[in-house]
Amino acid sequence: MSSFGRWTKLLVLGALCMAPALAAQDNRVGELQSELARLRAEVDAMKVVQRQGGDEEPALATKLSKARLFSWATEDGNFALTMGTWVQFRLTYNDERAQDAEGPSDGNSVRASNGRDFWNFRVTRAKTFFRGNIFGKEWKYFVLFHWTAGGSDLFEEGFLTWAKYKEINVSVGQTKIPFNYEFLTGYNKQQMVEGSVVSETFNQGWGKGLWLSGVIGGDTPWVKYWVGVFNGALRANNDFRNQDRAVNADTFSQTVDADLMPVLRVETHPLGEVADDMVDMRGEDTYNKVLFSVGFAFNWLTSRFSNAALRPTSSSPGSGRSNTGQDTVAITLDGHFRWHGLSVNVAWFYRKTEFHNFGPLEGNGVTANRAFPGDLTDCGWTFEVGYMILPRQFDVGFRFGMFNADEFWLAGASTKRNALRPDSTELGLAVGYYIGGHNLKAQLDFTYITYQLAVGAGTLPANAPHGQPMPTRSPGSIAADQSDYWNVWQLRIQIQWMF
């Protein structure tokens, strides 16, 4: 047999042997194709859910939002959810130095605070938020939980906004009182590790109420505004600011005393919107544009209070309402400049408290002979400047702030003075490395805060450094009108991540 014939025979025999395998393979391919078709049908079925009436509802699509957070939305955009969690982990070194004229022999805790130095690791904040819209793009919501706060402060914010028009939005719920810029910006967008002492002295905290907001001016927000009315819950009997984070029932109390608090904040951004951020986080494609904004805010809190160190105390025999009250008007003016990584933030604060007597205390002349204050006036200001050396990566910053409390004479003696807040001066330096913007960053700052402790029993202040108790003065030091100082040096290293 020729070689051609032998090769032909071998090919025919090979084909006969492979035929069953090829047939089996064809069958497997067919099965896989059928399985793929079935899976596609199931996916298509999941994308279409029949409502009553036969309308189709699109499925959710998962994506990463511009803020690098996970987001879900329907194809028509009527339902959307963005969820994020941010955590601040901090190492603090605290060094306290106090001085008083009498020395430690009298047991004065001002001098005793010299030994209160420490190192401490701490989860300063851990928060989770949800935002988006429901039943339409104009119905927006926001909810924020603060896990490290605990108690009734766990629920920090939650509000619903009707935002059909950019010029006017209507919101109800609980939010930060729209007063000062630094507090509204948030602790996760600070240039320093912590907010300034001046901001912590003047901010109006959180509140429940109804407010309007909006932007007028198209692409150039000539006017941004917030105007609303809130509960106006007195923070403390020696702290005439609002703080309405507790869950208060519909029952009468001196905490919620039927007094509503009006608030107004107005901003202008004539060259383009300045982002709610204490640093210039714009990239190289946009940071050459000069931006600046100016803001003004007004807050009026009226309430009853009970503090024997400030006024004689008594209560109505019927309702139990205190016969002493206060009116506090607070205003702030702030400005913000951004250019080429340079950020400048300045703010000025003013607050005036007037006291009133009611019922049997009315007209009893308690302000005579300097026995009690008739009114109090406080003011302060902050200046922060920073520079982003590498766009959106590395920056350095500086803070300077001063607070001047109104001192008043106590108990009719000209040598006895008191104050609800100690005069304070804050200096700070900071460096930050932004690995993923504010979503992942490391910060280090060094701060020095000095307090002149013109305070005494019944009027202990609340503007100490974050998480720090304020020492008290001895009665002898107050009587002698001596200047006691408390100086706090802090080195803080913090890493923040948000996802």
Image (cartoon, grey):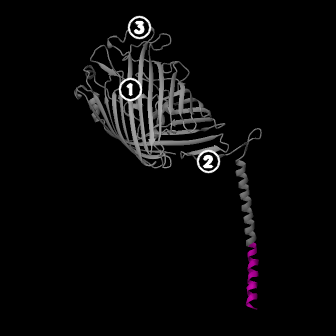
Label 3 secondary element: loop
Camera-nearest residue between 208 and 430 = 430
* Quadrant for the N terminus in the image: bottom right
Task: Give left or right: position of 184 versus 470.
Answer: right
Residue 431 position within the rendered picture, expressed as x and y whole percent measured from the top left: 38, 45
Which SS type dominates the magenta stretch?
A: helix
Range covered by the magenta-colored residues: 1-20
Asked if marks 1 and 3 touch (Cβ < 8 Å), the reply is no
The residue where tag 3 is placed is 363
For discs 1 and 3, the disc positioned in front in the rendered view: 1
Q: Residues within 10 Å of mark 2 (few under 14, many from 20)?
A: few
At label 3, the amino acid type is: Gly
Could you say which disc has been placed on residue 67 in the image?
none
- At horizontal 70% and vertical 51% (from top left) the residue drawn is 43
Alpha-carbon span between mark 2 and mark 1: 49 Å
The residue where tag 1 is placed is 379
- At horizontal 28% and vertical 24% (from top left) the residue drawn is 474
Residue 253 position within the rendered picture, expressed as x and y whole percent measured from the top left: 50, 19
The residue where tag 2 is placed is 62
At label 2, the amino acid type is: Thr
Task: Give left or right: position of 215 versus 376.
Answer: right
Work out whether 245 lies above or below 117: above
